[in-house]
Image: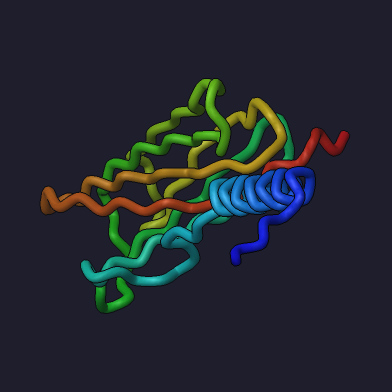
Amino acid sequence: MLKTMPRSLSSGLLFTSFLLILLGAIVTGCARTSHQSGGLASDDGMQMTLAVTPDPPAVGEATLTITLRDANGDTIEGANLAMKGDMSHAGMTAVIANTSQSNQGVYTVPLTWTMAGDWTISIVATLPDGNIVTRRFDLTVASDMR
């Protein structure tokens, strides 16, 4: 003979199970993924590094410094860089900047952080030979420190 649980206990277990599944989905959905960053080279052999001034980044004016190196470690002059900054949550306007000015493979571009929070910077570099290199960098922008 099959015994059944009292209805209140069965409902409680079902509700608890639902909450655990929902919590797992929320935690998984909110986890930040790691992107190509630092001076790491990818399959194309290119190295791209990003430095932000001020460091740590804060709301307001900033300078991005991007260094491009080929597979041999030599800096690359004459590339065109397009940068796009997106916040990790929907509804925010992207921050966009471009440059083709460099000094021995080091490119600087002014940028204004519009809000504190987690940002992803996507950089597309069109090299002098026509090849395109794309990298993404994650960073956190603090509230204005002034």
* Residue name at image x 39 percent, y 61 percent: 48
| Residue 56 visible here | no
* Residue name at image x 54 percent, y 45 percent: 64
In the rendered image, the vertical position of residue 85 relative to residue 41, given as above or below: above
- Percent position of residue 54, x then y: 71, 46
- Percent position of residue 35, x then y: 45, 58
Q: Quadrant of residue 15?
A: top right
- Percent position of residue 145, x then y: 85, 38
Left or right: residue 101 compared with residue 14: left
* Residue name at image x 49 percent, y 53 percent: 137
Query: Most extreme residue toward the left, as rendered?
Result: 129
| Residue 127 visible here | yes
Query: Most extreme residue toward the right, as rendered?
Result: 146
- Dividing the image into 4 quarters, which one contains the C terminus? top right
| Nearer to the camera, 97 or 116 | 116
In the rendered image, the vertical position of residue 79 relative to residue 3, given as above or below: above
